[in-house]
Image (tube, rainbow, N blue to C red):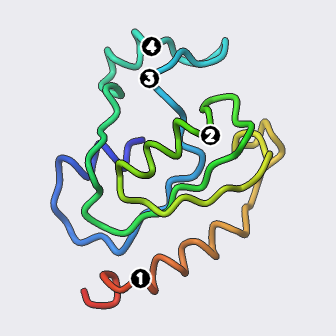
Amino acid sequence: MTTVHWAGRHRRPVTGALLAAPPDFDTPLPAGYPTLEALTENGWTPVPRTPLPFPSIVAASMNDPLADFDRVAGLAAAWGSRLENLGSVGHLNPVCGYGEWSRAEEFIRALGRTPSAASD
């Protein structure tokens, strides 16, 4: 989420952003993760719902324990992001078996080819 908060505070040239498996900070996270109160105290909530000023892709899992897919789809729509359904892959982190993630490079290359990125 830091990208979304950052984008609301800064105006610097950005070619694009890949938001991989953004968590849903508006609902309680599973045990072992920060509470809603801690997220609020540290500035993570509310989650901005304004369009990002640069191209973006949200890559989301159908069974991410940190976010319901439909809620992430709503965030992607609010941000003006292209939504990529990764299928049922859990959360994109080492605990779920992820290390290097080659699809990230595919998405980053796609962001580099977007019309607004090409005109900068």
- Depth check, mark 3 against mark 2: the one in front is 2
Closer-to-camera residue (38/71) = 71
13 is higher (above) or lower (below) than 76: below
Q: Amino acid at mark 4?
A: Leu
Q: CA distance from mark 1 to mark 4?
A: 36 Å
Q: Amino acid at mark 2?
A: Phe
* Neighbourhood count class around disc 2 (C-alpha, 10 Å): few under 14, some 14–19, many 20 upward: many
Q: Please, what secondary structure does the residue beneath circle 1 have?
A: loop
Picture disc at residue 114: 1
First reached walking from the N terminus: tag 2 or tag 1 = 2
Which residue: 53% across, 79% down?
110
Q: CA distance from mark 4 to mark 2?
A: 19 Å
18 is higher (above) or lower (below) than 9: below
Closer-to-camera residue (77/89) = 77
- Identify residue for label 2: 69
Which residue: 50% across, 54% down?
19
Picture disc at residue 36: 4
Q: Please, what secondary structure does the residue beneath circle 3 have?
A: loop
Q: Please, what secondary structure does the residue beneath circle 4 have?
A: helix
Q: Quadrant of residue 54?
A: bottom left
Q: Position of residue 13 (x, y in %)?
A: 23, 72
